[in-house]
Amino acid sequence: MKQFLLIALCATSISAMAPQAAEAAQIKRACLASDRTAATRDRCSCIQRVANQALTRSDQKTVAKWFKDPHQAQELKMSKTARDDALWDRYRNFGQMAQAICS
């Protein structure tokens, strides 16, 4: 039930984001450029829509780099700064939302 409510909330929020379509699709491009077999155009587009909802443009720029170098994500996760902790929390939320909506 909890997961259903999360998916419903996210789907409703994402549909209201149409004006943001002109934004740079950093996450989508990084996703498509990755060597992951699950990185289809539809799935990467979905992940980008979730990123538009859950991450700032600056966050997206940072997270897009992690597709090429996942070790950067680990370094941020281990960081002790409040700023990095906040980004990691937003990233985890984004990941959970993307998994629930785009799988």
Image (spheres, rainbow, N blue to C red):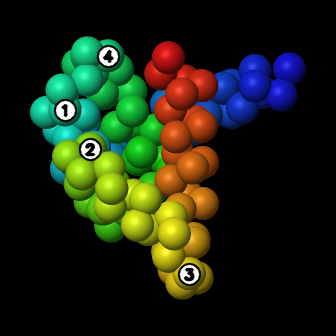
Q: Who's the residue at 32% across and 67% down the image? A: 58
Q: Who's the residue at 52% across and 45% down the image? A: 94
Circles 3 and 4, Cβ within 8 Å, touching? The answer is: no
| Res 98 label | none
Circles 2 and 1, Cβ within 8 Å, touching? The answer is: yes
Question: Residue 37 location in percent, x, y?
Answer: 26, 15
Mark 2 vs mark 3: which is more N-terminal?
A: 2
Q: Amino acid at mark 2?
A: Phe
Residue for badge 2: 67
Q: Of all residues shown, which one is farthest toward the left?
A: 33
| Res 34 label | 1
Q: Amino acid at mark 3?
A: Lys
| Res 80 label | 3
Q: CA distance from mark 2 to mark 4?
A: 13 Å
Q: Of all residues shown, which one is farthest toward the bottom?
A: 81
Residue for badge 4: 38
Q: CA distance from mark 2 to mark 1?
A: 6 Å
